[in-house]
Image: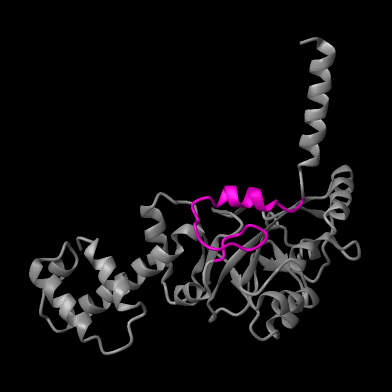
Amino acid sequence: MNKKLIFTIALLSGIFSARAQRIGSTPEYIITLTADWKGERFPDGRPKVPDAILERLKNVSMEDAWGVLRNKGYQNQYEGDWTVIQPDSVMTGRVVTAQYLPSRPDLIKVVKEEGKTENRAQQGGTNSWPIDILVPGDVYVADGYGKIADGTLIGDNLGNSIYAKSLRGVIFYGSVRDMAGLSEIKGFNGWIKGSDPSYIQQMMLTTINAPIRIGRAVVLPGDVVLANKYGTIFIPAALVEELVLTSEVTALRDEFGHQRLREKKYLAGQIDSQWSEEIKKDFLDWLKNYPGKLPMTKTELDNYLKERNY
């Protein structure tokens, strides 16, 4: 192969590679990132975790969720130390990611030109682009690299738009403005690193629905987030259902154990270690007569217990 042909191939490869650098990830790329998910997907490629699972996830403790993920090898999914707009509220949802960087004129030009190619709105700032694609059940998660002053990704106008589209809120490793207005949006919530009266300046959007870092956590598009006043944890879609069921059973075990300890039926060491056959049978009998409504179906519970040596 002669040098001229090699140069031509290299040039064409460079052109095609450059063109492939989109603002919004393609469905094919998102499917590749989330290949373990075998269920239904949105048109953009993100896993469509069922609403019923998102609802059950609200009752899972941060510690239980963290423990399940840790046991699966996912050690970088939690971030804490947030300012929460409505601290007594719990939010779950399917993640839409966005990445922001400090402004650079030549890169801004590329982003805006690519935005035209992808038919993104040309009026207003690029910080509205992730909002435009939200659907019910989505949580807008953005890495604003911790910028507070002049790093306000939204105010109450965009907050209203976010809630109207997603019926959820935001998680920003960055800041917001108009806290008073945001706190008045019924149903909206936000986990943020701070607030400031300034407008967004000298920062730019670079990607939508690509992998991002939120403090200690690695977040992929289509992850499911559990957010409460104790922190945020980002769960791979393929693990959510198992995590919810495992956490629900753990909560029932804890409830049973606490009750039996108060009744002085067993010693603390018996409950806090691998259970004897006597305690296992007692637990199963206790489940059959559980006074409330179990969070899972009987089939789910039976199948789970068959596979566990608790």
Q: Quadrant of the C terminus?
A: bottom left
Horizontal and vertical percent for residue 39? 51, 61
Viewer can see residue 303: yes
Is residue 24 within the magenta segment? Answer: yes
| Residue that appears at 53% across and 75% down | 51
Horizontal arrangement in the rendering, residue 205 relative to residue 31 (left or right): right
Query: Mostly what secondary structure, the magenta segment?
Result: loop
Q: Quadrant of residue 175?
A: bottom right
On screen, residue 109 versus residue 189, left or right, reads right
**Is 304 positioned to the left or the right of 47 in the image?**
left
**Total residue callouts:** 0
Q: Where 35 falls versus 6 (above or below)?
A: below
Q: Can you give x and y, in whole percent of width and height, for residue 22 in the image?
A: 77, 47
Q: Quadrant of residue 45?
A: bottom right
As for residue 274 lying within the magenta part, the answer is no
x and y percentages locating residue 36 in the rendered image: 49, 52
* Residue range of the region highlighted in magenta in the rendering: 23-48
User: Residue at the spot x=29%, y=78% of the render?
Assistant: 298
Vertical relation: 229 (above or below) 221: below
Q: Identify the residue at the far bottom of this view.
A: 291
State the residue in front, 9 or 72.
9
Above or below 83: residue 29: above
- Say if residue 267 shows up in the picture: no
Towards the viewer: 216 or 66: 66
125 sits left or right of 175 in the view: right
Determine the residue positioned at 87% across, 63% down.
121
Residue 41 location in percent, x, y? 59, 62
